[in-house]
Image (cartoon, rainbow, N blue to C red):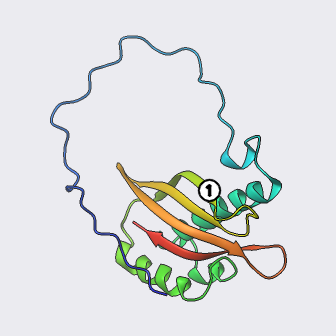
Amino acid sequence: MTVVPVIDYEPPAGPAERPAPAPRAVCRSLPPHRPRAAARAGQSARHRDAARFAEAALRAVLEAVDRRRQPGQLRALLAGRLLDAVDALRHRVGAGAETAVLRRVRLQAVDPAETAFEVAASYARGPRVHAIAARIGPAPGTRWRVTALHIG
């Protein structure tokens, strides 16, 4: 399996042409709390478990890419050669890059039995937003493992 980097079609980040106008009124009430994807009603226990795993695994992958975690710590989370791909991406990002922050994670079951899930996520690195696509499947025992990974 190979992981191919996504071509970045966005223009280089630069200064804004005009600053945004100052807000006229201050919002004094907080928006209603949105539950995490893992805690939404109507999802099976297996789906919630997979969502928790996906969020934790993607955070760990981004930490490894940012050099805040050793890639070897991902061995139990990633299948096959994905560890080598994360290590290669780590060298491409460089040590001086801004920290990646996982923003949103969404899961879709591949089949009605929920034996595997496709994951779509977004993360921010500075002012830019990037995408991650992954697939998670069962690992030995009752655990999950990332079986495919595409980081943009």
Identify which residue is drawn at 78% across, 73% down.
Answer: 143
Identify the secondary structure beneath mark 1: strand
Identify which residue is drawn at 62% across, 79% down.
Answer: 78
From the viewer's perspective, is residue 128 above or below residue 6? above
* Residue type indicated by callout 1: Leu
Where residue 125 sits: x, y (%)? 40, 56
Toward the viewer: 45 or 53?
45
Toward the viewer: 143 or 108?
108
Where residue 11 sits: x, y (%)? 20, 55
Identify which residue is drawn at 44% across, 85% down.
Answer: 2
Where residue 99 sits: x, y (%)? 45, 59
Toward the viewer: 103 or 28?
103
From the viewer's perspective, is residue 125 above or below residue 139? above
Residue labelled with disc 1: 107
Where residue 35 sits: x, y (%)? 69, 38
Apparent side of residue 124 relative to residue 41 in the rendered image (left or right): left
From the viewer's perspective, is residue 84 above or below residue 49? below
Q: Dividing the picture into quarters, in which one does residue 110 lie? A: bottom right
Image quadrant containing the C terminus: bottom left
Residue at the front extreme, as displayed: 112
Identify which residue is drawn at 68% across, 73% down.
Answer: 137
Q: Dividing the picture into quarters, in which one does residue 4 lie? A: bottom left
